[in-house]
Image (cartoon, rainbow, N blue to C red):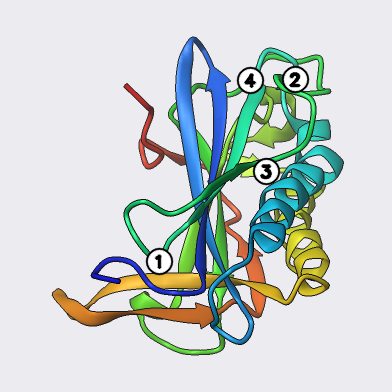
Amino acid sequence: MAWPYLDGVIKIVISYTIGGEVAINVVFVRTQDESSATQIQMQAAATKMYDALDAEWIPVVSDTVDLVDVEAIEWRAPDGILKRAVGTFPLAGDHTSNPMPANVALVVSHRTGHVGRSKRGRSYMLGFTESDVSGNIPTAALALAASDTFTVYNTDIDADDLELIVYSLYEDGSARTTPASTPVTSHQVDLRVDTQRRRLGT
């Protein structure tokens, strides 16, 4: 096992298509006892993310945006096992309204109870519609859907002895000798949408 990998960590890769482009969101989970993840845990990590998105986020996503894949990658080595979510792909959004531009995202901050940038994470939620934003402010329902996606997911994977984490490779601008993984305890949605912060695939 070598940097930037860490035993017990699973990388979750969420892929969408929006406006003819592929957009990717990444979160990390780990086993609660920090032991190597089993294939059953990895399958659960992927499929339960799909389920949380389907239940909480897809209802507020434009029907012109598709969720095309959710992968769980064993993050203890470069050749880690990969598991894909069990679900229907592509999964289109439910909202019959135009999506916001592809460079616009709603930011969910993942809090850990510790201070410092390396102890906070972010997810950039995409595909929501123009009707759920007014003056760059998301509706309460949209903000709740974003937050609930991760709250539901973290609750569901607890049954598999997994937890959402903030995964940090650097501290004060220098590479850590060993990556840090800190459990997420809460989620907070920024009350303004952001632009040009979410990277589009090539």
In this rendering, which labeled residue sits more in front, label 1 or label 2? 1
Looking at the rendered structure, the kind of residue marked 1 is Arg
How far across and down, in percent of the image, does residue 112 sit? 55, 82
Among the two numbered marks 4 and 3 on one chain, the one whose residue lies closer to the N terminus? 4
- What is the distance, in whole Å, between disc 1 and disc 4 at their CAs? 37 Å
- What is the distance, in whole Å, between disc 1 and disc 3 at their CAs? 38 Å
The reply to whether the C-beta atoms of the residues labelled 1 and 3 are less than 8 Å apart is no
- What is the distance, in whole Å, between disc 1 and disc 2 at their CAs? 33 Å
Q: Which residue is mark 2?
A: 92
Q: As displayed, is residue 175 above or below residue 142? A: below
Looking at the rendered structure, the kind of residue marked 4 is Pro
The residue sitting at 47% across, 36% down in the picture is: 24
Looking at the rendered structure, the kind of residue marked 2 is Ala
Q: Which residue is mark 3?
A: 138
The reply to whether the C-beta atoms of the residues labelled 1 and 2 are less than 8 Å apart is no
Q: Quadrant of residue 189?
A: bottom right
Among the two numbered marks 1 and 3 on one chain, the one whose residue lies closer to the N terminus? 1
Q: As displayed, is residue 191 above or below residue 195? A: below
In this rendering, which labeled residue sits more in front, label 2 or label 3? 2
**157 or 154: nearer the eye?**
157
Among the two numbered marks 2 and 3 on one chain, the one whose residue lies closer to the N terminus? 2
- Numbered circle sitting on residue 76: 1
Looking at the rendered structure, the kind of residue marked 3 is Pro
- Numbered circle sitting on residue 128: none
Provide the secondary structure element on which disc 4 rests: loop
- Numbered circle sitting on residue 99: 4
In this rendering, which labeled residue sits more in front, label 4 or label 3? 4
The reply to whether the C-beta atoms of the residues labelled 4 and 3 are less than 8 Å apart is no
The reply to whether the C-beta atoms of the residues labelled 4 and 2 are less than 8 Å apart is no
Q: As displayed, is residue 10 above or below residue 23? A: below
